[in-house]
Amino acid sequence: MKKKFFTQILDHFNFHPQSYQTFQQRYLINDKYWGGPKNNSPIFVYTGNEGEIEWFAQNTGFLFDTAPLFKALLIFIEHRFYGKSIPFGGDKEKAYSNSTTLGYLSSTQALADYATLIIDLKHNLTATDSPVVVFGGSYGGMLAAWFRLKYPHIAIGALASSAPILNFENITSPYSFNNIITQDFRSESENCYKVIKGSWQEIEETAAKSGGSEILRKAFRICKNDTSVGSLGGWLETAYIYTAMTDYPTPSNFLNPLPAFPVKQMCKAIDDPKTGNNTFEKLYGAANIYYNYSGDATCFNLDDDSDPHGLGGWTWQACTEMILPTDGNNAESIFPESVWNYTDRAEICKYIFNIEPRPNWITAEFGAHNIHRVLKRFGSNIIFFNGLRDPWSGGGVLKDISKSIVAIVAKEGAHHVDLRFSTNEDPMWLQEVRRREVHIISKWLSQYYHSLVDSSN
């Protein structure tokens, strides 16, 4: 992959003098398999999400696996304000300093970046007739779907994997996310589910006792300098949430190094008879799968705020337009009971950035209400993939909208598992998902080439 930079405009939607400032936007390009512009060979574009673009490229093997088949040029575009694509002279501190500078970080600006860059790149490669297909996973999958809807003259189709485009105001239940995590653990073992569910109270009761903090610190091998036992709950929750998201059928290193079927491995640790009735020992064994599968850590720092993939800008996005209600917990939930409360989110955002979120903007800009009725009328050529073990699937499109807006749903699938590199250990259902995706993309391309011939006659 060659790294390149494109001179991108700061603000696509205003004509104020400051809108004309530019920044360097990074993209990765791989032309190893490209059939070239003479053959109008396709261009596959990954619409980058909230982090460094190399990280997404390393975890999006589907494009590399299929490029030789389609003779495709591969482009991975980095999202503004992430990685090396930082406005304001590449100075992250300045770009992230306040809401005036961060105001340019939004999904609509990012999509306009992608449109501008693709048009310019095609022009420079004399490839104006090469069809573009966009791909993305998670937030990148949302962007891929929205790009196809907003810029149909640029992309002939989109593969939107694990894209929770329905996870907005009053469309998806705020309980669905944690209900799916609960189901993931419960499906492995009822005992595992019960131990985790009952553990929160035990942690609280221990913490309240004299010397309780030290008991917890020892039980969870928390580093000496780290005394904030209050963050223990968050640390454990993170492990369960991310393990459910990345419950892949093969070993992975996306968020952390993990074995195949990590939820099963966590439950094995919890169900291990050797730990008897010691809840903390069981939870430590489970957390160790997520935080220390490599076995290198001797103790855990609960206040570790390192950000290896550069995801920091998401806090801003989650405080402005990406209001995805996920933290409601009913009585059955594996987590303590709680109610999703928009006011809490708004107050935190006011405190951090001194701004008011706009929870209704995304659905006004891109649509989501009655999506099956709406997209049937005007949309086409989108694949929505969702794995039902992925907590985000609750906000995904799970049934076909039309002949060309297709939902592929995998009962055993986790977060954008279809986009990962294929391996010999991949189960049959996953191979079948990818075969279907390749077949559908082939159809889009042949329709495009037919229309090209017809229009030139």
Image (spheres, grey):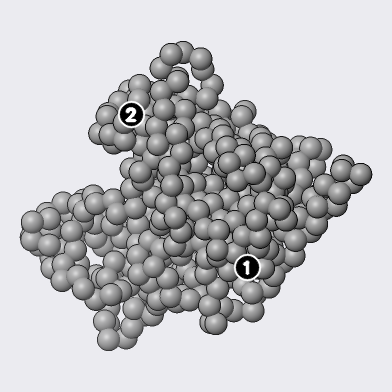
Residue corresponding to mark 1: 68
Residue corresponding to mark 2: 88
Q: Is residue 392 above or below residue 214?
A: above
Give the spatial CA distance, label 1 vs label 2.
38 Å
| SS of the residue under disc 2 | loop
Q: Is residue 385 above or below residue 77?
A: below
| SS of the residue under disc 1 | helix
| Snapshot quadrant of residue 207 | bottom left
Q: Position of residue 340 (x, y in %)?
A: 45, 41
Q: Is residue 397 visible?
A: no
Q: Quadrant of the C terminus?
A: top right
The crowding category of the residue bearing disc 1, from other C-alpha atoms within 10 Å (few below 14, some 14 to 19, many at least 20), is some
Instruction: Please name the residue shown 44% across and 62% down the image.
Output: 58
Q: Position of residue 21 (x, y in %)?
A: 41, 23
Q: Is residue 149 above or below residue 253?
A: above
Q: Give the camera-side residue of 434 and 209.
A: 434
Residue type indicated by callout 2? Phe
Judged from this view, the residue extending furthest toward the bottom is: 274
